[in-house]
Each structure stands twice: as structure tokens, then as C-alpha cells.
Image: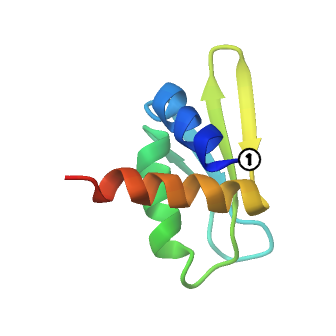
Amino acid sequence: MTTEEATEILGVQGSLPCTIHFWGTDTPSRNFDTVHDGLNFITEAGKQEPLPDLHIHGNQGDIAVNGPDLEKLIAAASAIRSVP
């Protein structure tokens, strides 16, 4: 996923609900009202946990994002938040 693709996903799907699954840890799965809220949580929890799987719940089905693609999505969200 490129930075442009990550930014497009946030623009199109950033307000959709999502679920975050931390595999192999004691942190339970959590549901969030928006992808932006979920990414904010990952940014904080990610300091203590491995990167989770992020499932975006859209009208056409779920999209799973993890690994390097999730890192790009987090970076794009951080860049968007830092723009005044």
C-alpha cells in the first residue's frame, strides 16, 4: 500500500466502524465507531503491543489491514491529524 492509497482509504472509509484484533496478547479485541478512532487507539496501544489486525466494516464487506499496510495507514492518519 502506498501513502496515497492509505490516504484514500482514510478519506473513503475513515468514518466506518472497525474492529481491532490483537493476536497472541492479553489485549482483547475492541470495536470502534470509526477507523480514525481505532487508529488512534493502535497508536497508543502499539507502544506496548504488537501491531494488530484492523477490520474495517463496510457495506460491501470487511477489509482486513495488517503488517506494513497497517503501518502506512497509521502514518497517513498521523499526517492528517497533524495538519492544522
Type of residue at label 1?
A: Met
In front of the other: 10 or 22 = 10
Q: With respect to residue 71, does 20 lie above or below?
A: above
Residue 66 is situated, as x and y percent measured from the top left of the image, at: 75, 55
Residue with the most extreme left position:
84
- 70 relative to 80 in the view: left or right: right
Label 1 packing within 10 angstroms: few (<14), some (14-19), many (20+) = few
Scheme of image coloration: rainbow
Q: How many marks?
A: 1
Residue 80 is situated, as x and y percent measured from the top left of the image, at: 37, 50
Image-quadrant location for residue 50: bottom right
Question: Which residue lies at the image location 44% right of the left edge and 38% below the top edge?
Answer: 34
- 37 relative to 75 in the view: left or right: left
Image-quadrant location for residue 71: bottom right
Question: Which residue lies at the image location 63% right of the left edge and 29% below the top edge?
Answer: 57
In front of the other: 24 or 6 = 6
Q: Mark 1 sits on what residue? A: 1
Q: For residue 29, say whether it is visible.
A: no
Q: For residue 19, say whether it is visible.
A: yes
Q: With respect to residue 61, does 47 lie above or below?
A: below
Name the secondary structure under disc 1. loop
Question: Which residue lies at the image location 64% right of the left edge and 38% below the top edge?
Answer: 5
Question: Which residue lies at the image location 63% right of the left edge and 14% below the top edge?
Answer: 59
Residue with the most extreme bottom position:
48
Q: With respect to residue 9, does 6 lie above or below?
A: below
Q: With respect to residue 33, does 66 lie above or below?
A: below
In front of the other: 37 or 27 = 37
Residue 61 is situated, as x and y percent measured from the top left of the image, at: 73, 21
Residue 1 is situated, as x and y percent measured from the top left of the image, at: 74, 47
- 84 relative to 20 in the view: left or right: left
